Amino acid sequence: MSSTRRRGDALTTAIFQAVLSELAGSSFEELTFDKIAFAAGTGKAALYRRWSTPAELVLAALSDPGTGFGEPTAPPGTGVLRDDLIALLEHFVRVLDEPRGRALLPLIAHRHRHPELFEQVHRLVVRPHQEVLLSVLRQAVERGEAAPGSLTPRVVSVGPRLILFQAWEGGLVDSGEIASIVDEVLIPLTRP
């Protein structure tokens, strides 16, 4: 435990970083306030004063603008659907290699064990980022690059799901794989 007593934002950041690190290294079932407090260099009382359960703390950490996902990034706006999709999927791959992305993976993989928690993660983290992809597709439809019928949540989720599957199967996805997903799957799927 740290000998320096942190307060306010510094303590919150340390707690959020500890939550994401602990979650990324194990599973939600193994996440306890004891482990989080130890990793953050604080006492359990600092956690219990603000969050009543590990699930509340996980949601706070994942939705935090500094350590978690916060507001989604703006659409790339390249003016070309392929380039926008590649930029967004490359960003997603980079995020998966960060503590926040590594913490998200076990929650997605084991969503059936904690459906209420996953629904909140989906609402706070996944859905806002899907909206960015949807806006990219909407712009492509307006330019005549994509079919209006491609503006669905299922179509929007195809690219990220393929990236997640590749990440689980063999680690990080390289730029060649991203381009293949866009060229072989997403462009044909959305073509007018």
Image: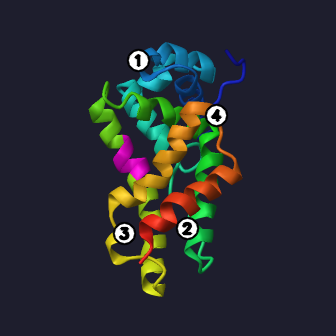
Q: Is residue 129 magenta?
A: no
Outermost bottom residue: 143
Real-space Cα separation, disc 4 to disc 3, in angstroms: 29 Å
Name the front one of labels 4 and 2: 4
Q: Which comes before the other along the chain, label 4 or label 2?
A: 2
Name the front one of labels 4 and 1: 4
Q: Which comes before the other along the chain, label 2 or label 1?
A: 1
The amino acid type of the residue labelled 4 equals Gly
**In this orientation, which residue lies closer to the viewer: 66 or 169?**
169
Q: Which residue is mark 4?
A: 171
The image quadrant that residue 38 belongs to is top right
Q: Which residues are magenta?
A: 121-126
Outermost left residue: 116
Residue ID at (36%, 25%)? 53
Crowding at dot 4, Cα within 10 Å, few <14 / some 14-19 / many 20+, comes out as few
> Which quarter of the image is occupied by the N terminus?
top right
Q: Which residue is mark 3?
A: 150
Q: Which residue is mark 2?
A: 74
